[in-house]
Image (cartoon, helix red, strand yellow):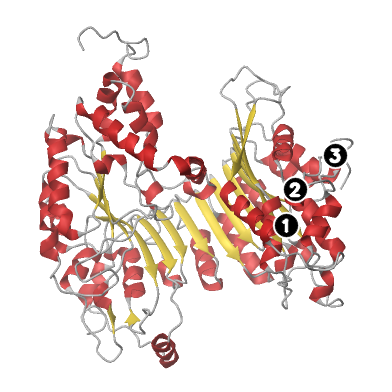
Amino acid sequence: MSGTTLSPFERLPHVILDIICGYLDDESDHRSDLCAFSLTSHRCCDVAKTRRFSQIVLVVPNLDDLEAILADLRAVLGHGERYALVHRLKVGGVLFDGALPRETTRPGDEEGDQSDQSDQSDQSDQSDQSDQSDQSEQKHAEDDANLQLTERNFDGPPFCHFAQPCRWTPLSSRRGPGIHHDDDDDDDDWLPLAAFLRELPALKDLVWNGRVPRSVLDALHDARRPCRLHVLGFRLPSLVYDRETPRAISPDDFALVTSPALYSIRAPLCRYDAHGAVDYSPEVVSLMLQGLAPNLANVWLETQVLGAGLSLNQSVALGRPAWRGFFLEGPTDEETKLTGGTGSLRNVLCQYNAEPSIFSAQNMASLRCLLLDWSEERTLALANLVTAGSLPRLDMLSLMRIHSSTRPHQAAINQILSHAKPLRYLCLSGHFTRETVEIVTRHHGSSLRTLSLHPYAAGYYVTPHGAYDARDLFAFSRDAVELIADRCPALEEVYVEIQRTRGDPREVAIYRALGRLTRLERVLLHLRCSLPTNDDVHPPRELATYESLKEIFCNHATDAALARAIYNIVSPPAGHGPGRRRLSYLRIEPQFVTEVHIFNTLFYDALHSLGRQWVCQPTKDQNDQSSNNVVVREYQAREARAAREECLEADWSYPRQHVDNYEAMFQDLWPGDGPPWDRWTSLPLQTGDEVSE
């Protein structure tokens, strides 16, 4: 309306409002914060338009609906020439949670946006009122997932979101999802989308979930400006066949693996399919990493888990014939030339048992981020590369699931960390020694911004011949954290595992040592409690006594008061000093670890009802420096409620002192009236005099 008076907020300069939109836009599928901002007023809607239309999420549940979906989208984009605003297009099947992103349903006009989306919001509110609390928890869970250590540090969008767990079903063909085919019967069905891609003059990124049709690939090759292709669920159907009938790679699959547009892949790999056919995709993906895909920069390799079946078991027993090359003629000179280019890899996440040949000085020269599941061969190959100075740009390294504690393997890890350039991000999980942490803090301490150390608990320790003694392996202690604080002053994010010891001064001393990291912003804290390991004298069942399980429950109980107390010690409310800020994010997760696998499901239900997860964050009032300046909210509360219900409905017919009578244990620990599952509290922290270690 012409007579409408703008609020002071709406009168802010366009550039300021655009900056606000930038903070609100998380570039996820839903982008709920940005959409809510655009609904505030016509002025906000107009300012948010550029960012809202920069990314379009196209959900195609059925190919029969594709033309109608594109017609609706053209109607929206045609108003105001919005085609030029689209920089990223995501195409996939239905979201796992059944929700459609707002950009997908109907972006709307400047005038119509608010009314259309408001109607949709009203309908959604009416249908989902009963699940409002669950939706709030889901929203918080998504926010927390975006803060996990390994998900914040990839290449810029879209790979940072591309590398998160996929919530989309793959695009299906008319033959049905999961059916392999190498003809182009379905390719014509995607021609309308290929034509639509040619209408987007500023398209920079296409994120595709499923098999990429040739018509879509050709549209990217014909684009007036380079467009990067990011493929979720990367697969090559023509390379999956019966061992008795080998065949050459199809022209469409060969065009994809050699495409200059291919920039990112997430490939679930296995050497067989569920029906026992052999799958040679792993060999081709290895060649792609070595230069076959000339511009491939981001790679996530993960192991595809197959169910057991007679055909699969028989095929595995027969062995896997060697791959005969793209055209069944063995490696040719032309194929060798295709893999001879310079490497463009920037980010590699390998959770697949890949051959060490994927690591070469040629294809890793530009690598910045490497997340690698440990294996003897890959670790030794990586150690040789790093020692030779072949990874000059690497600044983010993660070595995960280090299962071996033998001296040669630990020496290879130390060799990698001693010769790598100073790292900005480091994650180690599994077995590693105190010497390894000494090397990390000495060589990388001044440059580290994120440090994640996840040592295996004693229950996971096995002592093979030539292994380090368990006392030489790293475990968090006050001295260890103080060493990190002294040598890593720039740390902003840490992952810490602490053995819970009834909140005694020894445990509190570790929290205080964390408080010495003055630039710390985010902490993920695992509170570990465990049974004693098997000492080869007592049978495993004897380790789980009535009293030992009471001790486990007592240590595992984590309520909001304990979470707040830990936060106030790690990030004290007063005496911060110049430039000192409170932690912006602390997540506390209780963890039970044991090698004794003798517990029933009710034991874990009882644990989950006690072991609540909490997120602590400061309030928005930066002037409030009191201990009350903390918001504590439960994380994954739905799972805890479900575990409590299981305990309430259980029939506790065991004798009073029986090792499986968890209800009696709760009553002993927290006496009183009412269900014992509601009376529990955490042990308070003993914040008196500290003890020496």
Q: Position of residue 595 (x, y in %)?
A: 72, 69
Q: Nearer the viewer, mark 1 or mark 3?
A: 3
Mark in the foreground, 2 or 3: 3
Q: Which residue is mark 1?
A: 474
Residue 446 visible in the picture: no
> What is the secondary structure assignment of the residue under circle 2?
helix
Say which mark, if any, is on residue 686.
Answer: 3
**What amino acid is found at the position of numbered circle 3 in the picture?**
Gln
Q: Are marks 1 and 2 in contact (CB under 8 Å)?
A: yes
In the depicted structure, whether residue 246 falls above or below residue 216? below
Residue 275 tag number: none
Distance, label 2 to label 3, CA atoms, is 20 Å
Residue 379 horizontal side relative to residue 15, left or right = right
Circle 1 sits in a helix, a strand or a loop, which is it?
loop
**Looking at the rendering, which quadrant does residue 660 occupy?**
bottom right
> On the picture, is 152 further left or further right than 25?
right
Q: Quadrant of the N terminus?
A: top left
